[in-house]
Image (spheres, helix red, strand yellow):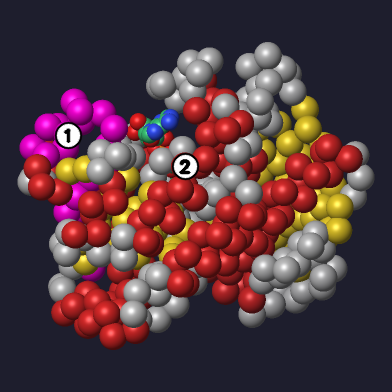
Amino acid sequence: MPAFASRLFAAESAAKEKLGWALVGLGRLSTNQLAPALQKTKHAKLVAVVTGTPEKEKLWAEKHSIPQSHIYNYEAFDKIAENDDIDVINIVLPNGMHHEFTVRAAKAGKHVFCEKPMAVSSQECREMIDTCRQADRKLGIGYRCQFEPHHLECIRLANEKAFGPLRQIDAGFGIRIEDFPQDDPKHWRLEKKLAGGGALMDVGIHALNACRYLTGEEPKTIVAQEVKTNPEKFAEVDETIVWTMTFPSGTVATCSTTYNYNGVNKFTVYADRGTFGLEPAYSYSGIRGTVEGKPIEKPDIDQFAAEIDDFALCIKEDRPTKAPGEEGLKDLIALEAVYESIRSGRTVEVKRDA
Ligand code: NAD
């Protein structure tokens, strides 16, 4: 986009009280979390949807007062460029589709807010970043926990070294995939092409991301082991992974993720002179935490409304988001090192070119 057009766009966006938000992919997250969050946001509102399911068009049009002119299917997606009501396109599709639709959205002149994991490879992440940069559009990744008050308190304690240097972090997030209502042998989360990976890409990424934002560092080495109790079901993607990361300042993180059972949903930070952490840590609500055994008293917020409002404000005020494409890329580089360690059976030195 030429610079003058970009400036014009920024000025128009800043003038809008609420930026126009489009949801692409109307599955569980869009239906149960993002659309309700967009009813609470101060700086964004739902104005359009993209779906491949004709029955959902009427449903969403009625429930969210979306005119037919603002409902797109995947084939007609690029026509979104002509719709000035849409400022941000939120990609809520299977992971393997994030790259294609982020690139198409940026080329349509829209800012992009893409769900985690950002993509299924670091190469895809780099291309998404480059395309958004060339189009002069912002790219944000849906790291809701980075906006959650209990997490922010732990980040503050870690960054300020309130208890001295961080020695060890234990972090893990697992879910039982049978708990998904659409669970069937063909579910996209079990297909490598659409999911990229299994539990690690889907939920383990939250634990990995936490280790990165608590230390403020990138992992130096990673060693991992995978366990499959159901090799048939998890033929294409990982079921359970445990991994260890070392960080440049000496912190060691021991992590786990699984699709096999609910329960592990935590991080504990062991610093020189004290311990703090969250459990549950990554749920949509009800986050609990302690510092040296005492509860962390913070409000229970809508994490999705918070991340959306923050990204909208970054656009309106033309400032960087704290969870940009580069943040998604750094996680993908670490995730790839976990998979590389499982493949090779060795400790992997993480390439830090992000
Ligand atoms: P979902 O299966 O409920 O929804 C996916 C949507 O994509 C569906 O509406 C489906 O119709 C559509 N779709 C389009 N093309 C498809 C294809 N070829 N195969 C399958 N579905 C196709 O999934 P979800 O739980 O809503 O997850 C969507 C994205 O959001 C994923 O990237 C996931 O990682 C992410 N997510 C993030 C969080 C979070 O905490 N930030 C939570 C849940 C999901």
Residue 215 figure quarter: bottom right
Q: Secondary structure at mark 2?
A: helix
Q: Position of residue 176 (x, y in %)?
A: 56, 26
Total count of labels: 2
Q: Earlier in the sequence, mark 2 or mark 1?
A: 1
Placement of 65 over or under 5, stated as above or below: above
Identify the amino acid type marked 1.
Glu
Looking at the picture, which amino acid does disc 2 mark? Met
Query: Could you tell me which residue is drawn at 84 percent across and 44 percent down?
Result: 341
Looking at the image, residue 272 lies above or below residue 64: below
Q: Which residues are magenta?
A: 43-62
Q: Which mark is residue 57?
A: 1
Q: Residue furthest right?
A: 346
Q: Identify which residue is drawn at 53% across, 15% down.
A: 185
Residue 291 visible, this orientation: no
Q: Residues within 10 Å of mark 1 (few under 14, many from 20)?
A: many
Using residue 332 as the reference point, say whether residue 145 is left or right of it.
left
Determine the secondary structure under disc 1.
Answer: helix
User: In the rendered structure, does residue 203 fall within the stretch colored magenta?
Assistant: no
In the rendered image, residue 89, in percent from the top left (x then y), is placed at: 32, 56
State the image quarter where residue 214 is shown: bottom right
Relative to residue 251, is residue 159 drawn left or right? Answer: left
- State yes or no: Cβ of the residue under disc 2 lies below 8 Å from any atom of ligand 1: yes
Give yes or no for contact between labels 2 and 1 (Cβ–Cβ under 8 Å).
no
User: What is the quadrant of the N terminus in the image?
Assistant: bottom left
Relative horizontal placement of residue 58, taking residue 222 as reference (left or right): left
Q: Is residue 253 above or below residue 94?
A: below
Q: Which residue is mark 2?
A: 97
Disc 1 residue lies near ligand 1 with CB under 8 A: no
Rendered-image quadrant of the C terminus: bottom right
Is residue 259 visible in the rendered image? The answer is: yes
- Mark 2–mark 1 Cα distance, whole angstroms, equals 20 Å
